Image: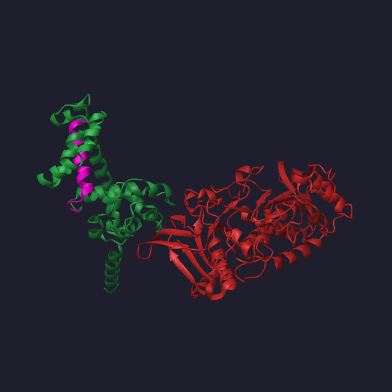
Amino acid sequence: MGANNVNDVNTQMAERYKNNFLKEIEEQAEMGDWVKMCMQCGLCSGSCPTSFQAGWDHPPQELFMMIRAGKRDEVLSSSSMWMCTSCYNCYVRCPRKVPVTHVMHGIAEYAYRIGRAPKNQPTQHLSKTFWDNCTKYGRVNEVKLTQSLYFKDGIGSGIKKAMEMQSVALGLVKSGRLNPMEAIGGGHKCKDLKGIHAMLAKAKELEAQRKAAKATAAG
Amino acid sequence: MTSVVATNQTILVVGGGISGMTAALEAAETGKQVVLVEKNPYLGGRTVQLYRYFPKMCHPTCGLEINLRRLKANPRIQVLTMAEVTGISGDKGAYSVSVKLKPRYVNDNCTACGECGKAVKTEIDDAFNYNLGKIKAAYLPSSMAYPQRYVIDAAIVGTSDGEVAKAACKYNAVELDMQEEVVTLNAGAIVWATGWQPYDATKIVYYGYGRFPNVISNVEFERLADPHGPTGGKILRPSDGKEAKNVAFIQCAGSRDENHLRHCSRFCCMASLKQTHYVQEAFGDAGKSTIYYIDIRAIDRFEDFYQNVKSNPNVNFVKSKVARITEDKEGNPICNGVNVEGYKRYATAHDLVVLAVGMEPSVKGMDIPAEVMSDSSGFIMADPANAGIFGAGCATNALDVNRAVQSATAAALRAIQVVNKVARAEA
């Protein structure tokens, strides 16, 4: 009787210290199993050229520590992963060879996948727009990509932005860097759009299989 | 020709630093014949280049003096300086070793009177002081040098300055026609004690060592603090000779880093903690030290030493690996990074930055001219299959002086057992 109670108390106590969120990140986020390797030296944040103090909620090693501390809400809704410019300075320098850049992207993707990423985050909007554009046409339609970015906050601000960038656009057109025909479905295209769509569908299927297998293996 | 008496009952010790000297003495004091081979013109290795030891803050000259007394009193040790082992053949109990001897251009007649040094004009880099200064090309490597004999640098041999050195000598000790020679000797067992070298800090590009004159290494800081060093013991920074009252120490400069040295070098935390004492002693309360660290690893019974330094209000601890060093207009190095306690960016100017560079073996395992097993950092590992060659001291691991001596004694014991077997077989 008494022994059982002690066991219950022990289980309860152990439960408090079980870090389900670290496990969740390891299983679900790309490269998430590297988080436990961080030794909190701070070289990644110190090497970050974005001067994160202004826009970032948390520098990488703080984010890693928060994951290990089980701060699920704060981590998933953090803006930090979306501020990364993928310069790879942190990855190159990390004394533990943690692929910091990839881990940041992995957590960002996971937060987005389960609908916890911050709303109206510009990097996220660009990523989504870029991805949709690129997969739809087989290669990036630059005119349409620019349009959808300029007009994301409405027609008024879109026209204003377009006018501001007018001379840049003309310069690009003149030097053959931008084809205005892309606006009406012209310009450069890929050779086998169907093939690309099939490839992407297969990749998505394989990734889903891999993630399911990993989740099962982790039990 | 140099003559060396050696048989299969002789123990060869390669490296005459604190580990090699210890192994040689321990073996010789049990009655074994020992040949001690040292690359430098003097014994004592890196240890004699230290200003003080931790934890007792005593001077290495003291320990060296005791070892030199033991050495001089022991007829069973033959010391070869300016000597390098170039080849080892044979097996346990019957090794044949070739040793290359570089000419010193000074013979046994030398009384270390110093007249040759006064006479010559040519100056060379002062290797003993990590090239922080210049010395004459006829020199005594250090005041404690053993053998207490001058060295004529090869740079002035065949020049008029060489003749000047010869003419200045009253004892006929300068021999400019000495030649390099290779001797072959027998040994029953070999103790490999070639020690360590500081990690090349220029490889840690973001710290600017080599680009910024006021970023130096911990071994160089030892020489700055030493009264026999290039500044006469004053802590003056290299760029302008200003007193360095605000000193930053950056831990794990190269160590614990997959891109540099994979291992923890173990001694550097204690070395930096010790060096804060130098700053405190030189400038009193005007001397400020800042230690940037990942974790302080004051191993074993050194925790007290750490707590003592920690309680000093003039020593500041910042938990962060500095990410970049920049320089301001006055030549002050600025440490940039993110403090892990609070995750705030900092950019702090100091008078001088000391990189606590780690240890790597001076001869990596694979460069040893014999079959030895070594780890991924090049440190020698114990190998049951190899029963006649034993690593000692920092050739086997990143060790402080105390542990190096323990390791050397253990290696001597193993070598003694091998030659004892040879002796029994030959009896």
In front of the other: B419 or B146:
B146
In front of the other: B288 or A130:
B288
Residue at 13% over, 29% down: A184
Residue at 53% over, 53% down: B209
| Image quadrant where residue B77 sits | bottom right
In front of the other: B151 or B370:
B151
Whether residue B102 can be seen here: no
Image position of A203 with respect to A9: above or below: above
Image position of B223 with respect to B423: above or below: below
Toward the right, the furthest residue is B171
Q: Position of residue A206 (x, y in %)?
A: 25, 37
Image position of B66 with respect to B364: above or below: below
Query: Where does the magenta region start and end?
Result: A118-139
Q: Position of residue A182 (x, y in %)?
A: 17, 30
Toward the top, the furthest residue is A191
Magenta highlight: main SS: helix
Q: Is residue A126 magenta-colored?
A: yes
Q: Which chain is depicted red? A: B
Residue at 17% over, 52% down: A119
Q: Is residue B248 left or right of residue B241?
A: left
Q: Position of residue B1 (x, y in %)?
A: 85, 44
Q: Position of residue A149 (x, y in %)?
A: 18, 42
What colour denotes chain A? green
Q: Is residue B297 magenta-colored?
A: no
Toward the left, the furthest residue is A155
Toward the front, the furthest residue is A167
Q: Is residue B170 left or right of residue B74?
A: right
Q: Is residue B344 left or right of residue B161?
A: left
In front of the other: B175 or B134:
B134
Residue at 66% over, 42% down: B370
Whether residue A24 can be seen here: yes
